[in-house]
Image (tube, coloured by chain):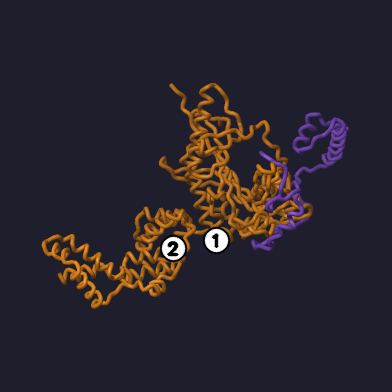
Chain colours: A orange, B purple
Amino acid sequence: MAKQYETVIGLEVHVELATKTKIFCGCSTAFGGEPNTHTCPVCTGMPGSLPVLNKQVLEYAVAVGLATNCSITQYCKFDRKNYFYPDNPQNYQISQLYLPICRNGKVEIETENGRKFVGIHEIHMEEDAGKLIHDEWDDCSLVDYNRSGVPLIEIVSEPDMRSAEEVIAYLEKLRMTIQYLGASDCKLQEGSMRADVNLSIREVGAKEFGTRTEMKNLNSFKAIARAIEGETERQIDLLEAGEKVVQETRRWDDNKGESYAMRSKEDAQDYRYFPEPDLVPIVLDDAFLEEIRAKQPEFREEKMRRYKEEFDIPEYDIEIITGSKHMADIFEATVALGSQPKKVSNWLMVETLRLLKENAMDPEDIRFSPEHLAKLISLTDAKKVNSSVAKEVFEVMFNEDVDPEKYVEEKGLKTVNDEGALRKTVEDVIANNPQSVEDYRNGKEKAIGFLVGQTMKAMKGKADPSMVNQLLKELL
Amino acid sequence: MANIISDETIEYVGILAKLELSGEEKEQAKKDMGSMLDYIDKLGELDTEGVEPMSHVFPVKNVFREDVVTNGDMREEILKNAPGEKNGMFAVPRTFE
Protein backbone atom coordinates (compact mmCIF):
# COMPACT_ATOMS: atom_id res chain seq x y z
CA MET A 1 0.00 0.00 0.00
CA ALA A 2 1.24 3.46 -0.91
CA LYS A 3 2.39 5.64 1.97
CA GLN A 4 0.10 8.39 3.17
CA TYR A 5 1.71 11.80 3.61
CA GLU A 6 0.62 14.97 5.33
CA THR A 7 1.82 18.48 4.54
CA VAL A 8 3.05 20.68 7.39
CA ILE A 9 3.05 24.42 6.71
CA GLY A 10 4.15 27.49 8.62
CA LEU A 11 3.98 31.02 7.25
CA GLU A 12 6.10 34.14 7.50
CA VAL A 13 3.90 37.07 6.56
CA HIS A 14 5.28 40.56 6.00
CA VAL A 15 2.78 43.40 6.26
CA GLU A 16 3.54 46.98 5.29
CA LEU A 17 2.04 49.32 7.87
CA ALA A 18 -0.19 52.20 6.79
CA THR A 19 1.86 54.98 8.38
CA LYS A 20 2.45 58.34 6.73
CA THR A 21 6.17 58.24 7.46
CA LYS A 22 8.95 55.68 7.60
CA ILE A 23 9.77 53.68 10.71
CA PHE A 24 12.85 55.65 11.80
CA CYS A 25 12.74 59.00 9.95
CA GLY A 26 10.29 61.68 8.80
CA CYS A 27 10.34 60.66 5.11
CA SER A 28 7.02 60.02 3.38
CA THR A 29 5.93 56.44 2.64
CA ALA A 30 3.67 57.59 -0.25
CA PHE A 31 3.65 55.17 -3.15
CA GLY A 32 4.83 56.11 -6.63
CA GLY A 33 7.20 59.03 -5.92
CA GLU A 34 10.10 59.70 -8.31
CA PRO A 35 13.11 57.53 -7.31
CA ASN A 36 14.92 58.67 -4.16
CA THR A 37 12.67 61.69 -3.56
CA HIS A 38 11.56 60.18 -0.22
CA THR A 39 15.00 59.71 1.27
CA CYS A 40 17.21 61.31 3.91
CA PRO A 41 20.49 60.56 5.69
CA VAL A 42 18.75 58.08 8.05
CA CYS A 43 17.11 55.83 5.44
CA THR A 44 20.17 55.93 3.17
CA GLY A 45 22.42 54.88 6.05
CA MET A 46 24.65 57.93 6.23
CA PRO A 47 27.26 57.76 9.01
CA GLY A 48 26.26 59.77 12.06
CA SER A 49 22.54 59.76 11.33
CA LEU A 50 20.31 58.42 14.09
CA PRO A 51 17.01 56.52 13.87
CA VAL A 52 14.00 57.47 16.05
CA LEU A 53 11.04 55.08 16.26
CA ASN A 54 7.71 56.18 14.75
CA LYS A 55 5.18 55.80 17.58
CA GLN A 56 2.42 54.81 15.16
CA VAL A 57 4.43 51.73 14.12
CA LEU A 58 4.54 50.57 17.72
CA GLU A 59 0.80 51.21 18.18
CA TYR A 60 -0.11 49.28 15.02
CA ALA A 61 2.16 46.36 15.97
CA VAL A 62 0.64 46.16 19.46
CA ALA A 63 -2.90 46.46 18.03
CA VAL A 64 -2.26 43.53 15.64
CA GLY A 65 -0.71 41.56 18.51
CA LEU A 66 -3.73 42.10 20.76
CA ALA A 67 -6.14 41.22 17.95
CA THR A 68 -4.28 37.93 17.38
CA ASN A 69 -4.25 36.99 21.07
CA CYS A 70 -0.52 37.52 21.54
CA SER A 71 1.21 38.45 24.74
CA ILE A 72 2.88 41.83 24.34
CA THR A 73 6.54 42.13 25.25
CA GLN A 74 6.54 45.00 27.73
CA TYR A 75 10.33 45.35 27.66
CA CYS A 76 11.20 45.29 24.00
CA LYS A 77 14.25 46.16 21.86
CA PHE A 78 15.54 46.28 18.31
CA ASP A 79 18.43 44.27 16.91
CA ARG A 80 20.68 44.58 13.87
CA LYS A 81 20.59 41.90 11.21
CA ASN A 82 23.82 42.21 9.25
CA TYR A 83 24.08 41.54 5.52
CA PHE A 84 25.66 43.20 2.51
CA TYR A 85 23.40 43.99 -0.39
CA PRO A 86 22.92 47.30 -2.22
CA ASP A 87 19.19 47.50 -1.37
CA ASN A 88 20.29 47.97 2.25
CA PRO A 89 22.55 51.02 2.54
CA GLN A 90 23.35 50.54 6.27
CA ASN A 91 24.65 47.01 5.68
CA TYR A 92 22.23 45.93 8.38
CA GLN A 93 18.47 45.79 8.70
CA ILE A 94 16.99 47.05 11.95
CA SER A 95 14.72 44.23 13.09
CA GLN A 96 13.88 42.31 16.26
CA LEU A 97 15.31 38.92 17.20
CA TYR A 98 15.66 38.62 20.96
CA LEU A 99 12.62 40.50 22.27
CA PRO A 100 9.99 40.76 19.51
CA ILE A 101 7.00 42.98 20.32
CA CYS A 102 4.41 40.14 20.31
CA ARG A 103 4.64 36.44 21.13
CA ASN A 104 2.51 33.31 21.58
CA GLY A 105 -0.68 34.31 19.80
CA LYS A 106 -3.33 32.36 17.93
CA VAL A 107 -6.13 32.96 15.47
CA GLU A 108 -9.13 30.80 14.71
CA ILE A 109 -9.71 29.78 11.10
CA GLU A 110 -12.59 28.00 9.42
CA THR A 111 -12.42 25.67 6.41
CA GLU A 112 -14.69 22.98 5.02
CA ASN A 113 -13.13 20.65 7.59
CA GLY A 114 -14.26 22.81 10.49
CA ARG A 115 -12.63 25.26 12.86
CA LYS A 116 -9.12 25.22 14.28
CA PHE A 117 -6.51 27.47 15.80
CA VAL A 118 -3.29 28.49 14.10
CA GLY A 119 -0.58 29.53 16.53
CA ILE A 120 1.42 32.71 16.10
CA HIS A 121 5.00 32.27 17.21
CA GLU A 122 5.87 35.97 17.14
CA ILE A 123 5.35 39.34 15.48
CA HIS A 124 8.27 41.69 15.09
CA MET A 125 8.80 45.19 13.74
CA GLU A 126 11.39 45.91 11.06
CA GLU A 127 12.28 48.15 8.15
CA ASP A 128 11.84 47.43 4.44
CA ALA A 129 14.76 47.62 1.98
CA GLY A 130 15.22 49.72 -1.16
CA LYS A 131 14.37 48.59 -4.67
CA LEU A 132 17.01 47.27 -7.02
CA ILE A 133 16.69 47.46 -10.80
CA HIS A 134 19.19 45.72 -13.03
CA ASP A 135 20.30 47.86 -15.92
CA GLU A 136 21.18 45.60 -18.86
CA TRP A 137 22.34 48.52 -20.96
CA ASP A 138 25.10 49.80 -18.67
CA ASP A 139 25.67 46.51 -16.89
CA CYS A 140 25.02 48.03 -13.47
CA SER A 141 22.33 47.95 -10.78
CA LEU A 142 20.23 51.00 -9.96
CA VAL A 143 18.85 51.61 -6.48
CA ASP A 144 15.80 53.57 -5.39
CA TYR A 145 15.70 54.03 -1.58
CA ASN A 146 12.11 55.32 -1.39
CA ARG A 147 11.10 51.95 0.13
CA SER A 148 14.09 51.84 2.46
CA GLY A 149 12.80 52.29 6.00
CA VAL A 150 9.11 51.71 5.21
CA PRO A 151 7.69 50.02 8.34
CA LEU A 152 6.87 46.31 8.27
CA ILE A 153 5.66 43.77 10.75
CA GLU A 154 6.56 40.14 10.22
CA ILE A 155 4.05 37.65 11.55
CA VAL A 156 5.57 34.20 12.06
CA SER A 157 3.08 31.38 12.50
CA GLU A 158 3.62 28.01 14.13
CA PRO A 159 3.77 25.04 11.70
CA ASP A 160 0.07 24.41 12.34
CA MET A 161 -1.40 24.35 8.83
CA ARG A 162 -1.96 21.17 6.87
CA SER A 163 -3.38 22.25 3.51
CA ALA A 164 -3.56 25.10 1.01
CA GLU A 165 -7.16 25.75 2.20
CA GLU A 166 -5.98 26.29 5.77
CA VAL A 167 -3.20 28.59 4.58
CA ILE A 168 -5.63 30.72 2.56
CA ALA A 169 -8.10 30.83 5.48
CA TYR A 170 -5.28 31.92 7.81
CA LEU A 171 -4.12 34.64 5.41
CA GLU A 172 -7.70 35.86 4.90
CA LYS A 173 -8.13 36.00 8.66
CA LEU A 174 -4.94 38.02 9.11
CA ARG A 175 -5.86 40.32 6.24
CA MET A 176 -9.36 41.01 7.58
CA THR A 177 -8.08 41.61 11.09
CA ILE A 178 -5.35 44.00 9.96
CA GLN A 179 -7.61 45.83 7.50
CA TYR A 180 -10.25 46.28 10.22
CA LEU A 181 -7.54 47.76 12.45
CA GLY A 182 -6.58 50.12 9.64
CA ALA A 183 -2.98 49.02 10.14
CA SER A 184 -2.45 48.08 6.47
CA ASP A 185 -4.41 47.60 3.26
CA CYS A 186 -2.83 44.13 2.91
CA LYS A 187 -2.75 43.91 -0.88
CA LEU A 188 -0.78 40.87 -2.01
CA GLN A 189 -0.52 42.03 -5.62
CA GLU A 190 0.93 45.37 -4.61
CA GLY A 191 3.25 43.83 -2.06
CA SER A 192 1.78 45.40 1.07
CA MET A 193 1.26 41.80 2.26
CA ARG A 194 3.84 39.15 1.37
CA ALA A 195 3.83 35.53 2.43
CA ASP A 196 6.72 33.07 2.52
CA VAL A 197 5.66 29.44 2.86
CA ASN A 198 7.68 26.97 4.97
CA LEU A 199 6.64 23.48 3.98
CA SER A 200 7.62 19.94 4.83
CA ILE A 201 5.93 16.58 4.50
CA ARG A 202 5.85 13.54 6.74
CA GLU A 203 4.09 10.24 6.87
CA VAL A 204 0.70 10.42 8.50
CA GLY A 205 1.11 9.65 12.16
CA ALA A 206 4.82 10.58 12.31
CA LYS A 207 5.88 12.66 15.30
CA GLU A 208 8.95 14.30 13.79
CA PHE A 209 8.79 17.04 11.17
CA GLY A 210 10.37 16.41 7.77
CA THR A 211 13.01 18.67 6.26
CA ARG A 212 11.38 21.93 5.20
CA THR A 213 11.86 24.31 2.32
CA GLU A 214 10.98 27.98 2.23
CA MET A 215 9.11 29.29 -0.80
CA LYS A 216 9.27 32.94 -1.84
CA ASN A 217 7.71 35.16 -4.51
CA LEU A 218 4.06 34.34 -3.88
CA ASN A 219 1.91 37.31 -4.77
CA SER A 220 -1.64 36.03 -4.97
CA PHE A 221 -3.79 33.54 -3.07
CA LYS A 222 -3.94 31.42 -6.23
CA ALA A 223 -0.14 31.40 -6.56
CA ILE A 224 0.15 30.37 -2.90
CA ALA A 225 -2.29 27.48 -3.37
CA ARG A 226 -0.51 26.31 -6.53
CA ALA A 227 2.93 26.62 -4.91
CA ILE A 228 1.80 24.52 -1.94
CA GLU A 229 0.42 21.81 -4.19
CA GLY A 230 3.53 21.89 -6.40
CA GLU A 231 5.97 21.73 -3.50
CA THR A 232 4.05 18.96 -1.73
CA GLU A 233 4.21 16.86 -4.88
CA ARG A 234 7.90 17.61 -5.43
CA GLN A 235 8.81 16.53 -1.90
CA ILE A 236 6.69 13.36 -2.08
CA ASP A 237 8.33 12.44 -5.39
CA LEU A 238 11.78 12.90 -3.83
CA LEU A 239 10.96 10.68 -0.85
CA GLU A 240 9.27 8.04 -2.98
CA ALA A 241 12.38 7.93 -5.20
CA GLY A 242 14.46 7.31 -2.08
CA GLU A 243 16.02 10.77 -2.19
CA LYS A 244 16.16 13.45 0.48
CA VAL A 245 14.55 16.87 0.71
CA VAL A 246 17.25 19.54 0.96
CA GLN A 247 16.62 22.45 3.32
CA GLU A 248 16.72 25.45 1.02
CA THR A 249 14.99 28.61 -0.13
CA ARG A 250 13.08 28.21 -3.38
CA ARG A 251 11.55 30.75 -5.70
CA TRP A 252 8.11 30.01 -7.14
CA ASP A 253 7.55 30.79 -10.82
CA ASP A 254 3.78 30.97 -11.12
CA ASN A 255 3.81 31.15 -14.94
CA LYS A 256 5.75 27.91 -15.23
CA GLY A 257 4.03 26.37 -12.20
CA GLU A 258 7.37 25.27 -10.72
CA SER A 259 9.98 26.40 -8.25
CA TYR A 260 13.75 26.51 -8.32
CA ALA A 261 16.36 26.63 -5.57
CA MET A 262 17.68 30.08 -4.62
CA ARG A 263 20.12 29.10 -1.90
CA SER A 264 20.64 26.02 0.24
CA LYS A 265 21.24 25.81 3.95
CA GLU A 266 24.98 25.37 3.37
CA ASP A 267 25.33 28.90 2.04
CA ALA A 268 22.57 30.30 4.22
CA GLN A 269 23.62 33.64 5.61
CA ASP A 270 25.00 34.25 9.04
CA TYR A 271 23.30 37.47 10.09
CA ARG A 272 25.33 38.10 13.26
CA TYR A 273 22.43 39.73 15.08
CA PHE A 274 23.24 42.04 17.96
CA PRO A 275 21.25 44.63 19.95
CA GLU A 276 20.73 47.91 18.06
CA PRO A 277 22.71 50.52 20.03
CA ASP A 278 21.11 53.54 18.31
CA LEU A 279 17.60 52.84 19.61
CA VAL A 280 16.67 52.87 23.27
CA PRO A 281 14.52 50.14 24.84
CA ILE A 282 10.72 50.31 24.69
CA VAL A 283 8.98 49.85 28.00
CA LEU A 284 5.21 49.49 27.76
CA ASP A 285 3.05 49.85 30.83
CA ASP A 286 -0.38 48.30 31.31
CA ALA A 287 -2.07 51.67 30.77
CA PHE A 288 -0.59 51.90 27.26
CA LEU A 289 -1.82 48.40 26.40
CA GLU A 290 -5.26 49.23 27.79
CA GLU A 291 -5.38 52.35 25.65
CA ILE A 292 -4.65 50.32 22.50
CA ARG A 293 -7.11 47.62 23.57
CA ALA A 294 -9.85 50.22 24.06
CA LYS A 295 -9.38 51.39 20.48
CA GLN A 296 -9.86 47.93 18.94
CA PRO A 297 -12.73 47.99 16.41
CA GLU A 298 -15.62 45.58 16.09
CA PHE A 299 -14.01 42.77 14.04
CA ARG A 300 -15.61 40.92 11.17
CA GLU A 301 -17.11 37.95 13.05
CA GLU A 302 -18.80 40.19 15.61
CA LYS A 303 -20.02 42.48 12.84
CA MET A 304 -21.51 39.55 10.91
CA ARG A 305 -23.34 38.34 13.99
CA ARG A 306 -24.71 41.82 14.69
CA TYR A 307 -25.82 42.36 11.08
CA LYS A 308 -27.72 39.07 11.20
CA GLU A 309 -29.62 40.29 14.24
CA GLU A 310 -30.10 43.92 13.28
CA PHE A 311 -30.69 43.98 9.54
CA ASP A 312 -33.06 42.01 7.39
CA ILE A 313 -30.56 41.26 4.62
CA PRO A 314 -29.37 37.94 3.14
CA GLU A 315 -26.41 36.14 4.70
CA TYR A 316 -24.53 36.34 1.41
CA ASP A 317 -24.85 40.13 1.41
CA ILE A 318 -23.50 40.24 4.96
CA GLU A 319 -20.53 38.17 3.95
CA ILE A 320 -19.65 40.44 1.01
CA ILE A 321 -20.27 43.72 2.83
CA THR A 322 -18.27 42.80 5.93
CA GLY A 323 -15.52 41.42 3.68
CA SER A 324 -14.32 45.01 3.46
CA LYS A 325 -14.19 47.30 6.46
CA HIS A 326 -14.62 50.28 4.14
CA MET A 327 -17.76 48.85 2.56
CA ALA A 328 -19.19 47.93 5.96
CA ASP A 329 -18.52 51.50 7.14
CA ILE A 330 -20.40 52.90 4.12
CA PHE A 331 -23.27 50.48 4.70
CA GLU A 332 -23.64 51.39 8.37
CA ALA A 333 -23.31 55.13 7.81
CA THR A 334 -25.94 55.08 5.04
CA VAL A 335 -28.36 53.09 7.19
CA ALA A 336 -27.71 55.50 10.06
CA LEU A 337 -28.88 58.31 7.77
CA GLY A 338 -32.27 56.62 7.56
CA SER A 339 -32.06 54.49 4.43
CA GLN A 340 -33.61 51.05 4.48
CA PRO A 341 -30.86 48.41 5.00
CA LYS A 342 -32.13 46.18 2.20
CA LYS A 343 -31.96 49.04 -0.29
CA VAL A 344 -28.47 50.09 0.79
CA SER A 345 -27.33 46.50 0.54
CA ASN A 346 -28.81 46.24 -2.99
CA TRP A 347 -26.87 49.27 -4.23
CA LEU A 348 -23.67 47.82 -2.79
CA MET A 349 -24.27 44.26 -3.94
CA VAL A 350 -25.41 44.98 -7.49
CA GLU A 351 -24.29 48.30 -8.96
CA THR A 352 -21.24 48.88 -6.73
CA LEU A 353 -19.83 45.38 -7.22
CA ARG A 354 -20.47 45.62 -10.97
CA LEU A 355 -18.62 48.93 -11.27
CA LEU A 356 -15.76 47.75 -9.04
CA LYS A 357 -15.33 44.73 -11.26
CA GLU A 358 -15.52 46.71 -14.50
CA ASN A 359 -12.90 49.16 -13.24
CA ALA A 360 -10.71 46.45 -11.66
CA MET A 361 -11.04 48.22 -8.29
CA ASP A 362 -11.14 46.95 -4.71
CA PRO A 363 -13.94 47.83 -2.26
CA GLU A 364 -11.31 49.92 -0.43
CA ASP A 365 -11.27 52.21 -3.48
CA ILE A 366 -14.95 53.21 -3.18
CA ARG A 367 -15.15 57.02 -3.15
CA PHE A 368 -18.84 57.94 -2.92
CA SER A 369 -20.08 59.16 0.43
CA PRO A 370 -22.83 57.57 2.54
CA GLU A 371 -24.67 60.95 2.45
CA HIS A 372 -24.89 60.80 -1.33
CA LEU A 373 -26.02 57.18 -1.40
CA ALA A 374 -28.71 58.01 1.16
CA LYS A 375 -29.88 60.94 -0.98
CA LEU A 376 -30.09 58.77 -4.08
CA ILE A 377 -32.15 56.20 -2.18
CA SER A 378 -34.58 58.84 -0.97
CA LEU A 379 -34.90 60.22 -4.53
CA THR A 380 -36.00 56.78 -5.74
CA ASP A 381 -38.21 56.20 -2.70
CA ALA A 382 -40.02 59.45 -3.46
CA LYS A 383 -40.29 58.39 -7.12
CA LYS A 384 -38.48 61.57 -8.14
CA VAL A 385 -36.29 59.47 -10.43
CA ASN A 386 -37.10 56.10 -11.96
CA SER A 387 -34.81 53.11 -11.54
CA SER A 388 -32.94 53.41 -14.83
CA VAL A 389 -32.21 57.11 -14.22
CA ALA A 390 -31.11 56.20 -10.68
CA LYS A 391 -28.59 53.73 -12.10
CA GLU A 392 -27.22 56.39 -14.43
CA VAL A 393 -26.87 58.85 -11.56
CA PHE A 394 -25.26 56.19 -9.40
CA GLU A 395 -22.60 55.56 -12.00
CA VAL A 396 -21.68 59.25 -12.05
CA MET A 397 -21.71 59.26 -8.26
CA PHE A 398 -19.47 56.19 -8.19
CA ASN A 399 -16.93 57.91 -10.42
CA GLU A 400 -17.05 61.45 -9.10
CA ASP A 401 -19.01 61.37 -5.84
CA VAL A 402 -21.48 63.98 -7.10
CA ASP A 403 -24.45 65.04 -4.99
CA PRO A 404 -27.33 63.13 -6.65
CA GLU A 405 -29.96 65.78 -5.75
CA LYS A 406 -27.97 68.53 -7.39
CA TYR A 407 -27.00 66.36 -10.32
CA VAL A 408 -30.61 65.34 -11.05
CA GLU A 409 -31.68 68.95 -10.79
CA GLU A 410 -28.91 70.28 -13.06
CA LYS A 411 -29.31 67.62 -15.72
CA GLY A 412 -33.12 67.79 -15.59
CA LEU A 413 -33.48 64.07 -14.89
CA LYS A 414 -36.47 64.30 -12.57
CA THR A 415 -39.37 62.05 -13.43
CA VAL A 416 -42.21 64.05 -14.95
CA ASN A 417 -45.15 63.59 -12.61
CA ASP A 418 -47.20 66.16 -14.46
CA GLU A 419 -50.05 63.96 -15.69
CA GLY A 420 -51.14 66.48 -18.30
CA ALA A 421 -47.77 66.48 -20.07
CA LEU A 422 -47.53 62.72 -19.88
CA ARG A 423 -51.09 62.23 -21.16
CA LYS A 424 -50.28 64.43 -24.14
CA THR A 425 -47.22 62.31 -25.00
CA VAL A 426 -49.14 59.07 -24.63
CA GLU A 427 -51.84 60.40 -26.96
CA ASP A 428 -49.18 61.27 -29.56
CA VAL A 429 -47.63 57.81 -29.29
CA ILE A 430 -51.03 56.18 -29.79
CA ALA A 431 -51.69 58.40 -32.81
CA ASN A 432 -48.30 57.62 -34.37
CA ASN A 433 -48.35 53.84 -33.90
CA PRO A 434 -51.66 52.61 -35.31
CA GLN A 435 -50.31 49.13 -36.06
CA SER A 436 -49.33 48.45 -32.43
CA VAL A 437 -52.57 49.94 -31.21
CA GLU A 438 -54.51 47.61 -33.47
CA ASP A 439 -52.41 44.61 -32.40
CA TYR A 440 -53.12 45.41 -28.76
CA ARG A 441 -56.85 45.79 -29.37
CA ASN A 442 -56.80 42.46 -31.19
CA GLY A 443 -55.53 40.83 -28.01
CA LYS A 444 -51.76 41.00 -28.48
CA GLU A 445 -50.95 42.00 -24.89
CA LYS A 446 -47.25 42.33 -25.72
CA ALA A 447 -47.86 45.27 -28.04
CA ILE A 448 -48.33 47.53 -25.03
CA GLY A 449 -44.66 47.03 -24.15
CA PHE A 450 -43.64 48.65 -27.41
CA LEU A 451 -45.92 51.60 -26.73
CA VAL A 452 -44.51 52.04 -23.22
CA GLY A 453 -41.04 52.04 -24.74
CA GLN A 454 -42.00 54.65 -27.32
CA THR A 455 -43.48 56.86 -24.61
CA MET A 456 -40.38 56.53 -22.38
CA LYS A 457 -38.25 57.44 -25.37
CA ALA A 458 -40.33 60.51 -26.13
CA MET A 459 -40.04 61.49 -22.42
CA LYS A 460 -36.25 60.97 -22.60
CA GLY A 461 -36.55 58.33 -19.90
CA LYS A 462 -37.92 60.73 -17.34
CA ALA A 463 -41.28 59.09 -16.72
CA ASP A 464 -42.50 56.57 -14.23
CA PRO A 465 -43.03 53.41 -16.34
CA SER A 466 -45.94 52.16 -14.21
CA MET A 467 -47.72 55.46 -14.66
CA VAL A 468 -47.19 55.26 -18.45
CA ASN A 469 -48.57 51.75 -18.47
CA GLN A 470 -51.63 52.82 -16.55
CA LEU A 471 -52.31 55.79 -18.85
CA LEU A 472 -51.91 53.67 -21.98
CA LYS A 473 -54.40 51.10 -20.72
CA GLU A 474 -56.83 53.86 -19.89
CA LEU A 475 -56.55 55.55 -23.31
CA LEU A 476 -56.63 52.42 -25.43
CA MET B 1 47.63 34.26 23.64
CA ALA B 2 44.77 32.21 24.99
CA ASN B 3 42.55 32.60 21.92
CA ILE B 4 43.89 30.98 18.75
CA ILE B 5 42.01 31.89 15.58
CA SER B 6 41.94 29.05 13.05
CA ASP B 7 42.45 29.42 9.31
CA GLU B 8 38.85 28.35 8.76
CA THR B 9 37.54 31.08 11.07
CA ILE B 10 39.52 33.85 9.43
CA GLU B 11 38.43 32.56 6.00
CA TYR B 12 34.76 32.59 7.12
CA VAL B 13 34.98 36.04 8.70
CA GLY B 14 36.56 37.27 5.46
CA ILE B 15 33.62 35.92 3.45
CA LEU B 16 31.08 37.51 5.84
CA ALA B 17 32.86 40.87 5.69
CA LYS B 18 33.32 40.54 1.92
CA LEU B 19 37.08 41.06 2.31
CA GLU B 20 39.80 39.40 0.28
CA LEU B 21 42.91 39.06 2.45
CA SER B 22 46.40 38.09 1.35
CA GLY B 23 48.22 35.32 3.25
CA GLU B 24 50.19 37.91 5.17
CA GLU B 25 47.09 39.94 6.05
CA LYS B 26 45.35 36.77 7.23
CA GLU B 27 48.17 36.00 9.67
CA GLN B 28 48.07 39.55 11.01
CA ALA B 29 44.26 39.47 11.32
CA LYS B 30 44.44 36.14 13.22
CA LYS B 31 46.84 37.70 15.72
CA ASP B 32 44.73 40.87 16.09
CA MET B 33 41.50 38.99 16.59
CA GLY B 34 43.12 36.65 19.11
CA SER B 35 44.38 39.50 21.24
CA MET B 36 41.03 41.29 21.02
CA LEU B 37 39.28 38.18 22.31
CA ASP B 38 41.86 37.81 25.07
CA TYR B 39 41.10 41.37 26.12
CA ILE B 40 37.36 40.76 26.11
CA ASP B 41 37.86 37.56 28.13
CA LYS B 42 38.80 39.77 31.07
CA LEU B 43 35.10 40.54 31.42
CA GLY B 44 34.51 36.84 32.04
CA GLU B 45 36.38 37.19 35.34
CA LEU B 46 33.52 39.29 36.71
CA ASP B 47 30.69 37.63 38.58
CA THR B 48 27.57 38.52 36.56
CA GLU B 49 25.29 35.99 38.22
CA GLY B 50 21.77 37.46 38.34
CA VAL B 51 22.65 40.58 36.33
CA GLU B 52 20.37 41.32 33.36
CA PRO B 53 22.26 41.68 30.06
CA MET B 54 22.38 45.36 29.14
CA SER B 55 22.31 46.83 25.65
CA HIS B 56 22.31 50.51 26.61
CA VAL B 57 24.39 52.39 29.12
CA PHE B 58 22.01 55.33 29.50
CA PRO B 59 18.85 55.10 31.58
CA VAL B 60 16.70 56.29 28.66
CA LYS B 61 13.62 54.55 27.32
CA ASN B 62 10.67 55.19 25.02
CA VAL B 63 12.03 57.77 22.61
CA PHE B 64 9.47 58.15 19.82
CA ARG B 65 8.55 60.50 17.01
CA GLU B 66 5.04 61.35 15.85
CA ASP B 67 3.94 60.03 12.45
CA VAL B 68 4.31 63.36 10.64
CA VAL B 69 6.22 63.95 7.40
CA THR B 70 9.08 66.31 8.21
CA ASN B 71 11.42 65.61 5.30
CA GLY B 72 10.96 67.07 1.84
CA ASP B 73 12.60 66.03 -1.41
CA MET B 74 16.37 66.08 -0.87
CA ARG B 75 17.26 63.77 -3.71
CA GLU B 76 19.94 66.03 -5.13
CA GLU B 77 21.77 66.20 -1.81
CA ILE B 78 21.38 62.48 -1.15
CA LEU B 79 22.61 61.50 -4.61
CA LYS B 80 25.85 63.38 -3.97
CA ASN B 81 26.74 60.40 -1.76
CA ALA B 82 26.19 57.88 -4.56
CA PRO B 83 29.16 56.17 -6.19
CA GLY B 84 27.37 56.76 -9.51
CA GLU B 85 24.01 58.09 -10.64
CA LYS B 86 21.54 57.25 -13.39
CA ASN B 87 17.90 58.35 -13.79
CA GLY B 88 17.79 59.70 -10.24
CA MET B 89 19.01 56.39 -8.83
CA PHE B 90 22.20 55.17 -7.16
CA ALA B 91 24.25 53.28 -9.76
CA VAL B 92 26.25 50.43 -8.26
CA PRO B 93 28.14 47.42 -9.67
CA ARG B 94 25.70 44.86 -11.03
CA THR B 95 24.48 42.76 -8.12
CA PHE B 96 22.43 39.57 -8.07
CA GLU B 97 21.33 37.55 -5.12
Report in which chain the residue with disc 2 lies: A
Figure check: A136 above or below A425: above
**Residue drawn 52% across the image and 30% down it:** A234
Residue in the foreground of this view, choosing between A292 and A322:
A322
Q: Where is residue A78 in the image (x, y as percent from the top left)?
A: 69, 49
Residue in the foreground of this view, choosing between A148 and A232:
A148
In the rendered structure, find residue A436 and report the number of the disc placed on it.
Answer: none
Residue, disc 2: A398
Figure check: B24 above or below A82: above
In the rendered structure, find residue A295 and report the number of the disc placed on it.
Answer: 1
* Side of A214 where A333 appears, left or right: left
Of the numbered discs 1 and 2, the one sitting upstream in the chain is: 1
Figure check: A405 above or below B61: below
Could you tell me which quadrant the N terminus of chain A lies in?
A: top left
| Amino acid under disc 2 | Phe
Q: Position of residue B97 (x, y in %)?
A: 66, 39
Q: Determine the image quadrant of residue A390.
A: bottom left
In the structure shown, which secondary structural element does the residue marked by tag 1 occupy? Answer: loop
**Residue drawn 46% across the image and 41% down it:** A165
